[in-house]
Image (spheres, rainbow, N blue to C red):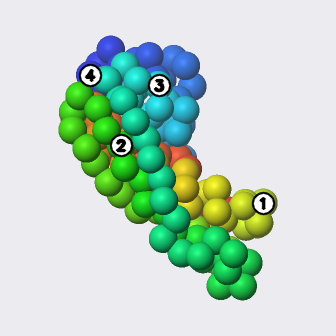
Amino acid sequence: MSKNYKAILKQEGHIISLQGKPFVTFKGLLWLAHKEGIEDIATESLVDLNRVQETGLAIFKATVKGKHGTYTATGDASPKNVSKNIARHCIRMAETRAICRALRLYLGAFIQMTALEEMGGD
C-alpha cells in the first residue's frame, strides 16, 4: 500500500489493530477505492433472500469496476460466523463482506490486509 495512503487511513482511524494484526475498515476501503478511480459497485444475492431466516445463510456476489479493471468476489454471513449483535443482520453483513473482498481485489497492491467487517464471531 502506498505509504501516503496507509498513513492517511491510519490517521483517519480506518486501520484497526485486533490481536496485534492490522485490519482496514469498510469506510477506509471505500475512500481509497474512490481515490483509485472506482466507477461502480454492483451486488447480487446468490440465495433466496426470503429463505435467509429459515436457512440462516446469506451469500452475496459483489462486482467492482474502475480504472484498475473489474473484480468480483463473494461474501457470506450466518449466525455461526457473525457476532450475536449482527446475527439478525446476516443479509447486510454478507453483502458488506462481498463488497469488502471485491474492493480489496480491485485495490490490489494498495491494500494488503483483511477488512475488519470480514471478520466473524465475537
Front: mark 3 or 4:
3
Q: Count all numbered tags in the image, as a single digit.
A: 4
- How far is mark 3 from mark 2, CA to CA? 14 Å
Front: mark 2 or 4:
2
Instruction: Establish if 74 lies above or below 50.
Output: above
Residue 20 visible to an observer of this rendering? no
Rendering coords of residue 59 (x, y %): 51, 69
In front here: 21 or 90?
A: 90
Front: mark 1 or 2:
2
Q: Which residue is mark 2?
A: 64
The kind of residue on which mark 4 rests is Ser
- Few, some or many residues within 10 Å of mark 4 (<14, 14–19, 20+): few
Residue 37 in the figure: left or right of residue 43: left
Identity of the residue drawn at 72% across and 85% down: 54
Q: Are marks 1 and 2 in contact (CB under 8 Å)?
A: no
Q: Secondary structure at mark 3?
A: helix
The kind of residue on which mark 2 rests is Val
Rendering coords of residue 64 (x, y %): 36, 43
Q: Are marks 3 and 4 in contact (CB under 8 Å)?
A: no
Q: Which mark is residue 2?
A: 4
Marked residue nearer the N-terminal end (1 or 2): 2
Instruction: Establish if 99 lies above or below 36.
Output: below
- How far is mark 1 from mark 4, CA to CA? 35 Å
Q: Secondary structure at mark 1?
A: loop
The kind of residue on which mark 3 rests is Trp
Q: Secondary structure at mark 2?
A: strand
Marked residue nearer the N-terminal end (3 or 2): 3
The kind of residue on which mark 1 rests is Asn
- Few, some or many residues within 10 Å of mark 1 (<14, 14–19, 20+): few
Identity of the residue drawn at 32% across and 23% down: 37
